[in-house]
Amino acid sequence: MIAFSYTILYVADVAQAMSFYERAFGFTQKFRTPENDYGEMVSGSTALAFASKELAQSNLSEGFLDSSSKEKPFGIELGFVTADVATAVEKAVAEGAVLYEPIVVKPWGQSVAYIRDLDGFLIELCSPMG
C-alpha cells in the first residue's frame, strides 16, 4: 500500500516559510535541518514540508519552475479546512499572505477563499464539506 505522506514546497527561505505557516495557521514545527534547507510541519495526518530552492536544485538535475508571487500560481493548491474561513483568511493576510480570491459560498454550502503565501503558493481556505 502507498500512503500520501507529505507535500514539499520549494521556498526561498525555509525558516521564514515555516514561521509563516506556524503564525498564520497554527501548524507546529516537527523537524528542521541544522542547515535550514529542509523542514517539516505537523499539519494534520499529512506533513507539510519545505525545501530550499538550492536543495531542490541539487535533487532535480532537470530543474523546476520557480513559484513567484509575480506570476500566476501553479495549477495546484494546498487545501486547509477550518470552521471559520473569514478569521483564517484575516489571520493569514495579517501574517503576509495575499488574498487571491475572496470568500465565496459554493452551491453545496461550502465557504471557500484563496490566498497566496510568502512564496506565491496557492492555498484554499475552506469550511468542511457536508
Image: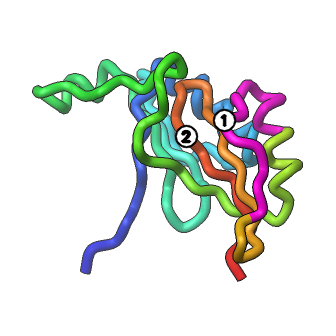
Is-magenta flag for residue 102? yes
For label 2, the residue is: 122
54 and 111: which one is in front? 111
* Residue at position x 49%, y 35% in the image: 32
Q: How is the image coloured?
A: rainbow
Q: Is residue 12 left or right of residue 101?
A: left
Between disc 1 and disc 2, the foreground one is: 1
Q: Is residue 94 left or right of residue 67?
A: right
Position of the C terminus, as image quadrant, is bottom right
Position of the N terminus, as image quadrant, is bottom left
Q: CA distance from mark 1 to mark 2?
A: 8 Å
Image height check: is 128 above or below 71? below
For label 1, the residue is: 100
Give the amino acid type for the residue marked by disc 1 in the picture: Tyr
Q: Quadrant of residue 24?
A: top right
Residue 77, percent from left and from top: 50, 48
- Give the mark nearest the N terminus, 1 or 2: 1
Residue 54, percent from left and from top: 31, 19
Residue 94, percent from left and from top: 83, 29
Mark 1 secondary-structure assignment: strand
28 and 79: which one is in front? 79
Image height check: is 29 above or below 96? below
Q: Which residues are magenta?
A: 91-105
Looking at the image, the residue that sits furthest to the left is 61
* Residue at position x 84%, y 39% in the image: 91
Give the amino acid type for the residue marked by disc 2 in the picture: Leu
Return the mark for residue 69. none
Q: Quadrant of residue 85?
A: bottom right
* Residue at position x 71%, y 60% in the image: 126
Is-magenta flag for residue 11? no
Q: For the residues labelled 1 and 2, say whether their Cβ atoms are less than 8 Å apart.
A: yes
Classify 10 Å Cα crowding around label 2: few (below 14), some (14-19), many (20 and above).
many
